[in-house]
Image (cartoon, helix red, strand yellow):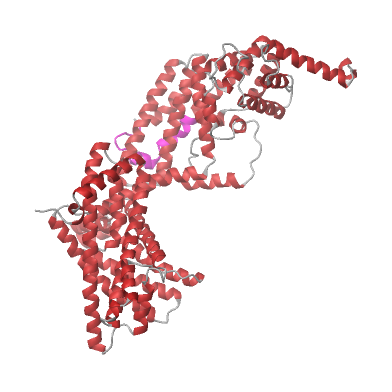
Amino acid sequence: MSATLLQPAPAREGRSSREVDAFCVEFAPRAPGHPAVRDLQKLLADVPEEGLEARLEWVERCVAWLRESRPALGLVEPAEPEAPAAVTRLALLVRVLEARASSREPVAALVREVMGGTSGLRLFSQVGLPAGQGFFGEVSDRLARHLLPAPPEDHQLSELLLRLFPVPEDAAWLETLPPALLARLSTLVGGSAQPPAREPEAVIRTDLVDALGLLSVQTAALGLSEDVRERCPEVSFRASPFLKLRRVCEGVQARDAAPDSLRELGDVVEECRQVVAIVSSHLEQYGVSVDLVYRLERIRRSLERMEAIARVLGAAPGEARWRESLALVADLLRRAHTDRSVRAVVASNARLLARKVIERAGHSGEHYITSTRAEYHAMVHAAAGGGFITAFTAILKLYAATLALAPFFYGLALAGTYVASFLMMQATGSALATKQPSMTAATLGSAIGQGGSSGRLSHLMELIPRITRSQLATAVGNMGTVLPVAVALSMGFAWWQGRPLLNAAQADYVVHALHPWHSGTIFYAALTGVLLWLSSLVAGWLENFAVYHRLPEAIAHHRALRRALGDSGARKLSDVFAHHIAGLGGNVSIGVLLALPPVVGAFFGLPLDVRHVTLSFGQLCLAGFALGPNAVLRPDFLAALGGIGLTLAINFGVSFSLALAVALRARDVPLSDMLRLVRLMSARFLRDPRSFLLPPRD
């Protein structure tokens, strides 16, 4: 046995204590009891000599020591009172390793073994980049990683990075480390008598160059895919920079990242970025696909990663290279945490899809905004047509409720009634007030997100009054027509059958159902507002789908249609389809959505219903005629009339607010712009309320 093992335990403890004291006196003579120094001595005295897992655990302990919040002020020169704790502790570590070869050599050996036993190829070429498997594949992959246990992968630097820095905020901590100190530390632990290939810097350099080659292959495959090439007709296949990208990266590998090869790589990367910009501009015109946009994002990020790697390889050794390396590692850490977030991938893609859907809905919303007096009167006339049709719809809805139908067939009858009514409005050019808020809000959101601040605000100061008076015109036209038409139909039915269209029990039920606080009118009106907003999304999505898949062009060039209708007939049909597809999707969807709540409620035993202001007002008019002129002055009937006003406000407010919120989020409009707009519009309303309510004078 060795003499050390034969020593009594108190003697060993005493010698260990003396070593700690001597270490503290040497490196902290003014504060020999400082915890940072004592902990560092214990850390350096316990460097493992073998076992990858043990070495990785020691690296974790070392990083945890650096992360301690208590700074090592006064222990290193020069002392900076405001220096972060990590900087002072890193400076202390560098000072100790420079002064003590007995501490430096074990640390250097450990770093060499860790770097030699791990690979950084995945870290540099995959972490933070979409996997190229599309939106839905990426979501399912991230969900699987959350739900299933992950096998240990100690040989991957990507796993070591997350192990050392488990929260996204650690990236900001990394950026506080001074590159000069890291360069000195790298020099201390990187040099060795081993062959150059075993040195940590050489290992990392090899991984960086290999990552460039792998990224070039993946990016070239994405950039040369068919859907990308179709949207970039300006660039031929042979002239595509994505073909050059792989050859240039092979040159970088062959010449060990020579400066001129890196400059050539930068030029090709810029050309690839221009192609992506062309494809993106075509998406603005020809519709969007989530998977295509996802692949474009993969190309953008890959190009950015290649540039970051090239900056590290091209930087001068020492402080400059470490500055670029720190920026790369901090970005990798942020993106590594984002890689594990399902919410992040859904939010980023949903924002883009929402932007395109809102733009399509905004195009439809422009038809509901009047500018001139003639347009205002035309909107009133169109709304009168909508009110006329709604009066018949209200009667059919009440008639369907009297039929002894199973819930499924009752819902089918309601959906058919609503869809037929809304499609008839579209065919006759009629307007319904409740369909406007979500569409006009999308138009408003698109206007808010366009142009500079001053020009945007001046445009909005004119647009918002146009929206409010157009909405008011439609509401007045609908309500002003529903009342006389419903009364006229009731009178005609009473003359024909000798009795009112509704009996007393049915009329009392309608009045009670519309009471604002004795029924669920408020909740049902809010639910209806949500359904109206959803129908606008369906309309925008369907139009985007048709544009993206070029359905109007397919119709115009369809052989069978051209034979049957002729070339001009096929083109006219194509124009009609392109013009009405959004309205068709919105009308069918809102008809089905309004019929769903009663059926779903009956299935689950929940009292669900809808409160559509125009339909509800038509039903109340029918009930008022059935109850007689004296009954309309009763408190319960007046309360139901107030419920109609409340339903109007809630239908409009909920659908408009939801559509505007999605539009603003899709456009990333800052809150300060919205607050400024509210202040300006409030001042204008107080100064000129007429412009918000009535059409402009001739």
Closer to the camera in the image, 46 or 582: 46
Whether residue 630 sits left or right of residue 140 in the image: it is left
Residue occupying the far bottom of the picture: 498
Magenta stretch holds residue 101? no
Whether residue 443 sits left or right of residue 45 in the image: it is left
In the image, residue 587 sits, relative to residue 163, either above or below, namely below
The image quadrant that residue 27 belongs to is top right
In the image, residue 547 sits, relative to residue 588, either above or below, namely above
User: Which region shows up in magenta?
Assistant: 214-238
Q: Is residue 340 visible to the viewer in this orientation of the structure?
A: yes
Whether residue 386 sits left or right of residue 17 in the image: it is left
Q: Quadrant of the N terminus?
A: top right
Residue at horizontal 32%, vertical 82%? 502
Residue at horizontal 64%, vertical 23%? 116
Q: Is residue 209 visible to the viewer in this orientation of the structure?
A: no
Magenta stretch holds residue 230? yes
Residue occupying the far left of the picture: 698
- Could you say where residue 333 lies in the image, as x and y percent from the top left? 53, 31
In the image, residue 204 sits, relative to residue 126, either above or below, namely above
Residue at horizontal 28%, vertical 41%? 450
Secondary structure mainly formed by the magenta segment: helix
- Could you say where residue 140 lies in the image, as x and y percent from the top left? 53, 48
Closer to the camera in the image, 557 or 18: 18
